[in-house]
Image (spheres, grey):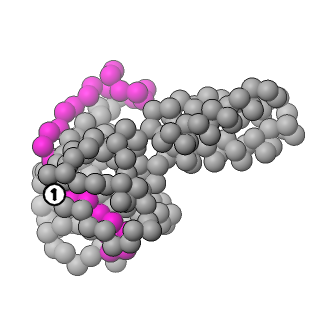
């Protein structure tokens, strides 16, 4: 089935920060901030480190929900601690955020383990590549779009640039490192406008 996710701000070849909600076999709900990649039609994917409650639930139920929200408290509570029950709908067999602008129900079709030596982060944990098929897309508020993490990197560089000429050399070096890292990240997951803007920002840093 072909789903058009542009309506909720999601395009192919970019990556978005969303809240994944899952449920275990005992009905306990869980949420986590995880990146989403859309491959077109009904195909989506994500990467999750081993040891995650979200990963355990996905392995057991082969199902999860991608919630589109820009609520900073939900992102924070889903990353630090546990999101309280009042944030979820009353559904007993699925975990959905009550105030999500939109949500995508996904059925898992494949889970592949990527060993630590092949992951981009230096650690001893495997990453699991999860491929899924969209079952349903529900749009509650078309004004709430999925958040592309590339924009955050660009804004960080712009804020630092406003201070770049008035800080010492040590701090300037830190800012330049962040430019290099954000430019790398935006090159991989940002949209074309953000890539173009980041290239402009990078050139301005290099002038000074």
Q: Is residue 156 visible?
A: yes
Compared with 92, 166 (above or below) is above
- Residue 157 appears in which quarter of the rendering? top right
* Residue sitting farthest toward the top: 117
- Image coordinates of residue 66 in percent, x first then y, are 29, 57
Q: Which residue is mark 1?
A: 135
- Image coordinates of residue 154 in percent, x first then y, are 61, 43
Residue ID at (33%, 73%):
140
- Image coordinates of residue 202 in percent, x first then y, are 67, 31
In this rendering, would 76 be left or right of 23? right
Q: Nearer the viewer, residue 38 or 128?
A: 38
- Image coordinates of residue 72 in percent, x first then y, are 50, 63
- Quarter that holds the C terminus: top right
- Residue 101 appears in which quarter of the rendering? bottom left
* Residue sitting farthest toward the right: 166
Residue range in magenta is: 97-123
Label 1 environment density (alpha carbons within 10 Å; few <14, some 14–19, many ≥20): some
In this rendering, would 124 be left or right of 61? right
Compared with 126, 132 (above or below) is below
Q: Is residue 38 magenta?
A: no
Q: Is residue 21 visible?
A: no
Q: Nearer the viewer, residue 95 or 147?
A: 147
Residue ID at (19%, 61%):
136
In this rendering, would 53 be left or right of 146? left
Compared with 70, 86 (above or below) is below
- Residue 120 appears in which quarter of the rendering? top left
Residue ID at (79%, 45%):
162
In this rendering, would 147 be left or right of 170? left
Residue ID at (30%, 45%):
38
Compared with 77, 147 (above or below) is above
């Amino acid at each position: 089935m072909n789903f058009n996710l542009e309506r909720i701000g999601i395009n192919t070849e970019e990556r978005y920060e969303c809240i994944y909600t899952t449920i275990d076999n005992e009905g306990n709900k869980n949420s986590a901030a995880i990146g989403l990649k859309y491959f077109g039609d009904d195909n989506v994917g994500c990467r999750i480190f081993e040891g995650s409650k979200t990963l355990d639930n996905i392995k057991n139920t082969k199902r999860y929900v991608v919630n589109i929200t820009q609520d900073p408290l939900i992102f924070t509570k889903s990353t630090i601690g546990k999101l309280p029950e009042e944030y979820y709908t009353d559904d007993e067999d699925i975990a959905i955020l009550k105030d999500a602008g939109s949500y995508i129900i996904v059925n898992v079709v494949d889970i592949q383990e990527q060993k630590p030596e092949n992951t981009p982060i230096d650690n001893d944990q495997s990453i699991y590549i999860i491929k899924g098929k969209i079952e349903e897309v529900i749009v509650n508020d078309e004004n709430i779009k999925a958040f592309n993490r590339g924009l955050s990197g660009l804004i960080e560089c712009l804020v630092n640039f406003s201070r770049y000429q008035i800080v010492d050399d040590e701090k300037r070096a830190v800012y330049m490192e962040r430019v290099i890292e954000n430019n790398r990240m935006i090159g991989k997951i940002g949209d074309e406008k953000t890539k173009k803007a980041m290239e402009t920002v990078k050139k301005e840093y290099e002038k000074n």
